[in-house]
Amino acid sequence: MAQTLSEQILSRAAGRTVSAGEVASVAVDLVMMHDSLSPSIIKIMEQELGAERVWDPERVAVVIDHVAPAATVQTAEKQNEVRRWVQRQGIRHFYDVGRGISHPVLVEEGVAQPGMVIVGSDSHSTAYGCVGAFGSGMGSTDIALAAATGRTWFRIPETVLVRATGRFRPGVSAKDLALHAARELRADGATYAAVEWHGVEFLTVMERMTLATFSIEVGAKAGLVPPVGIPQQVPDWLKVQEGASYIRIIEVNLDTLEPQVSAPSVVDNVFDLSALGRVPVDVVYLGTCTNGHYEDLAAAARILDGKHVAPGVRLMVVPASRDALLRATEDGTLAKLIAAGAALGTPGCGACIGRHMGVLGPNETCLFTGNRNFRGRMGSPDANIYLASAEVAAATALTGFITHPQDVL
Amino acid sequence: MSRVWIFGQDINTDQIIPGRFAPIMLKNEDDLRKYPFVEHRPEFAGSVQPGDIIVAGNNFGCGSSREYAPLALKMVGVGAIIAPLFARIFFRNALNLGIPCFTAELTTQLHDGQEVELVLEDGVIITESGEKIALPPPPVFLREVWAAGGIVPFYRQHGRFPGEAPR
């Protein structure tokens, strides 16, 4: 019987053929923990599970990304606790301040691979779908159990298919496809399901991560792009199968897709940019696991090259990883952004979670390349957050109001 | 008696606990109990009583995987959460913490501030006028986890995960 990518991956991990709707326990290939939740995960492991050691230190990755570098004495202390624990456990896959956000880092380091089951202490762990892994976000207790036992349980998900045809027009990119999907599916449209994104094999791995990270915003358990046309080695049992069944199919014609913007304060409040009217902004924030990659920095630099951000607008640039930052320094991308007036942040989650590095004050309007615009997400509950692509972010920084990239190219 | 607290749809985990009140950000982790809905509904944390029920609209708990969101609700003693659909990570976290969650749309049948009796063993809410509202039972494989009080007690008791055949 034809299987979806999720059914293929979870069958292998369960050690038997499983289908959507069944509940099964599975072996986990990789557990990701970040600085913000590691203290609670370690506490649950030691105090509730009596687990002094992780089941396999080669299969646990720890990343300091959520408050990187530490913003308070307290977060500094907590991070040091995590560092000491990592040492005691003999965990090699440890990435400290400055390496970047867990999701791109683990892909860049080759730790996240096609066909794996990956559970992470961050809801955007669906990101690993960019290389065709089944990545899912979980809370501290589930992660503690996975780190202690190497296993977890899932209800095998049905799959929602987003099928793209055509190619992006100038100024339009993966983020616009992701926002369009959120508009069609709504915030709960893929709850308990997996999303598969087809027709996007022309995208780079990190452009696919834009789609994969956004899968949670439609409620999905995982969000996978078929692992075709990527540098990673793909196991021969993992491929899209003719006849696999999808509970819903969304067709998207990229040839006619316009820049999309999510307006305050829910992710699926998506409009065509051209329908928004004049929206002045105070801050443009370019970063996050969704759109802080080299490709996003380069797209922004092409628009900002030789120009300067509008008076009264702050442009924050927070690369998603050190690799992205290094690449941007090597080809002049970073210089163009800085010369245009960008303020550079340490690779990491930055202000996405409202704790540091550009927290928003009351009555500020921010055009953000991240994945959530909930009230209070980036600081003050009286700030307004719009979500869009890196291209729209750069065009907006130039004019001071939300702008179609074609208007400034 | 339990007081009913009505919430809208798409209540997200940033509304339940904003990121800057995460336990690692607090001087005293126990202070987490002061912050559920601190911005979205400021009177909640100070007025909620153990056993009170949250009745919400669609997609409750969407957003982050932060377990400290349902944990804060558990700390203030929320007796049950009822919504027509739960975001999956939140549902899983609440299950792991032993917070009863029922899938039902009751935001129009009940009203904010109403006093009801929640009879968990029978899966029933009884209003002051004697009306009985049946709460749909959870899937079989989850009932065992609730009965054990959460996923850790379940795992320690049975040595396996939900859905696995007993050894």
Image (tube, grey):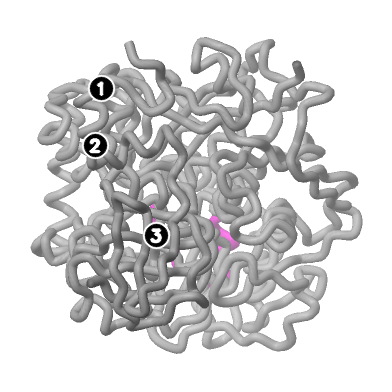
What chain does badge 3 belong to? A
Find residue B158 and name its label: 1
Q: Amino acid at mark 3?
A: Gly
Region in magenta: A334-346
Give the percent coordinates (x, y) of residue A267.
59, 65
For disc 3, the neighbor class at 10 Å (few under 14, some 14 to 19, many from 20) is many
Give the percent coordinates (x, y) of residue A297.
60, 55
From the viewer's perspective, is residue A22 above or below residue B27? above
Give the percent coordinates (x, y) of residue A86.
20, 30
Please indicate whether residue A152 sits to the left or right of residue A388 in the image: left
Along the viewing direction, whichever of A349 and A152 lies nearer the viewer:
A152
Find residue B116 and name its label: none
Along the viewing direction, whichever of A207 and A373 lies nearer the viewer:
A373
The answer to whether marks 2 and 1 mark residues whose Cβ atoms lie closer than 8 Å is yes
Residue A276 in view: yes
* Residue denoted by label 3: A350
Q: Amino acid at mark 2?
A: Ala
Q: Give a yes or no on whether discs 2 and 1 share a subunit.
A: yes
Q: Helix or strand or loop: what does disc 1 sit on? A: helix
Q: How many marks?
A: 3
Q: Residue furthest front?
A: B130
Q: In which quadrant will I find the C terminus of chain A?
A: bottom right
* Residue denoted by label 2: B148
Label located before the other in sequence (2 or 1) = 2
Give the percent coordinates (x, y) of residue B50.
18, 67
